Amino acid sequence: RIVPSMKDGQPNGFKLFGVRPDSVYTMIGLASGDTIHAINGYPITTPDKALEVYTSLRTASHITVSFSRNGATKTNDYTIR
């Protein structure tokens, strides 16, 4: 489950909940409680922004996901084949 995340009254990404051990999220290194803030440098603070980013990634061969876990900011890079 993915829900909008707020910080100081402002949207700051999307939080993941209920990530299953055998899910694609787990396979790419994401976990329940992670908050995704940006993909390929584009902030995903609202559903509209997330849809824009999704549309731009349809032909991407490389994806960078910026997220936070337990207060620490992390970045994962993926190559799509």
Image (tube, rainbow, N blue to C red):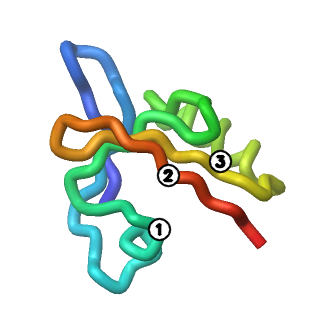
- N-terminal of the pair, mark 3 or mark 1, is 1
Tell me: residue 23, above or below residue 58.
below
Q: Residue at x 33, y 36 (%)?
A: 73
Which residue is labeled 1 in the image? 28
In the rendering, which numbered label is found on residue 54? 3
| Residue 7 figure quarter | top left
The kind of secondary structure element at disc 3 is helix
| Residue 78 figure quarter | bottom right
The image position of residue 64, as x and y in percent, is 59, 46
Graded by Cα atoms within 10 Å as few (under 14), some (14 to 19) or many (20 or more), the crowding at tag 2 reads: few
- N-terminal of the pair, mark 2 or mark 3, is 3
Nearest the eye: 38 or 3: 38
> Circles 2 and 3: CB distance less than 8 Å?
no
How far apart in space, not on screen, are marks 3 and 1 (Cα)?
17 Å
Q: Amino acid at mark 3?
A: Tyr
Q: Residue at x 34, y 23 (%)?
A: 11
How far apart in space, not on screen, are marks 1 and 2 (Cα)?
8 Å
Q: Residue at x 37, y 72 (%)?
A: 26
Q: Amino acid at mark 1?
A: Ile
Q: What is the residue that sits farthest to the right in this orientation? A: 59
The kind of secondary structure element at disc 2 is strand
Which residue is labeled 2 in the image? 76
How far apart in space, not on screen, are marks 2 and 3 (Cα)?
17 Å
The label nearer to you, 3 versus 1, is 1
The kind of secondary structure element at disc 1 is loop
> Circles 3 and 1: CB distance less than 8 Å?
no
Count of numbered tags: 3
- N-terminal of the pair, mark 1 or mark 2, is 1
Q: Is 23 positioned to the left or the right of 55 in the image?
A: left
> Circles 1 and 2: CB distance less than 8 Å?
yes
Q: Amino acid at mark 2?
A: Asn
